[in-house]
Image (cartoon, grey):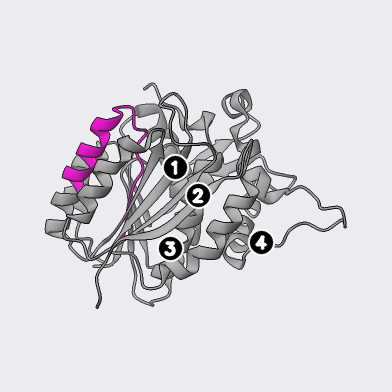
Amino acid sequence: MNYRHAFHAGNFADVLKHAVLFALIEALKAKPSPFCFVDTHAGSGCYALDGMQAGKTGEYKDGIARLLFPDMHGDGSAPALPNLLQRWLQTILDLPGNEDGLKLYPGSPLQVARAMRASDSAQLCELHTEEATRLRDLFHRDARVHVHQRDGYEALKGFVPPQEKRGLVLIDPPFEAQEDEYRTIEKTIKNALLRWPGGVYAVWYPIKRRSQVQPFHRWLQHSGVKRVLRAELLIRPDDSPLRLNGSGMVILNAPWKLDEVLREPMQALGRLLSQDRPAQTRLDWLVEEAP
């Protein structure tokens, strides 16, 4: 396993991904009926920011730490955050282990599990043994959560449609296969849509060169899905294949008014996560057919 998310936990890309994920879970919870969450690349679920791996890169300092501890203005006040971001950040501060400061960063499975209701469920896939073992240890007392040491792409066909008939699939691979990863994602989504056309599918992707992402976006526009929302955050120009310049999320079958929910938080992320130059954000519809 070449990629270890512990080195990157809480960075700017995680902030974008998890702010959008929080909004998606809130949208699902707006209805009383239960939902199912499927994570195809779950990781280990929780990461120590004061540990060796996160400490080696310190990427969280330009990510989650900037939101929790923003630079003070001259008048002694911190810039106000949109309500959605405030509520999401509070869930991180409320994580056991963060009582005395930011020590742990929860991955997608733990963030969703802490937000789920008793009637909701989660199916978590993690192929690599060490990560899967940690994931099982994290959730061994939670009957709502099921951990599978399997290839998430292959396993997804057995999880959709879920028994609950409502839910969200998160596809968040490490992109070790580079551009080939997009083709695998396209095949996986195409097959899943045949089984569950009404499901919500959220895909995270890195942005290095824009040309690497464009074919995937064109595929989405011709996928037959009627609503595909795109959210992107760029902290550097998208012209270098050697570093992570930004990241994005596409949401297929995006919940009603999700764009309105995310607009102000996205603008705030752009302000707070800027580094050498102003960050750029994009929130638009790749596909939006009239009802």
Real-space Cα separation, disc 3 to disc 1, in angstroms:
20 Å
The residue tagged 3 is 25
Dot 4 or dot 3, earlier in sequence: 3
Is 187 a magenta residue? Answer: yes
Dot 3 or dot 1, earlier in sequence: 3
Callout 3: few (<14), some (14-19), or many (20+) C-alpha neighbours within 10 Å?
Answer: some
Residue 278, quarter of the rendered image: top right
Q: Is residue 116 visible?
A: no
Real-space Cα separation, disc 2 to disc 1, in angstroms:
8 Å
Real-space Cα separation, disc 2 to disc 4, in angstroms:
14 Å
Left-right relation of 39 to 163: right
Mark number, residue 247: 1
Real-space Cα separation, disc 4 to disc 1, in angstroms:
21 Å
Question: How far across and how far down the image is residue 265, in percent?
Answer: 56, 60
Asked which secondary structure carries label 4, the reply is: loop
Name the quarter where the C terminus is drawn. Answer: bottom left
Type of amino acid at the residue the image marks with label 3: Ile
Kindly check if marks 2 and 1 are in contact, taking CB atoms under 8 A apart as contact.
Answer: yes
The residue tagged 4 is 81
Q: Residue at x 60, y 57 (%)?
A: 268
Q: Looking at the image, is mark 3 or mark 1 nearer the viewer?
A: 1
Question: How far across and how far down the image is residue 153, in percent?
Answer: 22, 41
The residue tagged 2 is 16
Q: Looking at the image, is mark 2 or mark 1 nearer the viewer?
A: 1
Question: Please, which residue is most extreme toward the right here?
Answer: 75
Left-right relation of 262 to 59: left
Q: Residue at x 59, y 29 (%)?
A: 54
Q: Which residues are magenta?
A: 168-188
Kindly check if marks 2 and 4 are in contact, taking CB atoms under 8 A apart as contact.
Answer: no
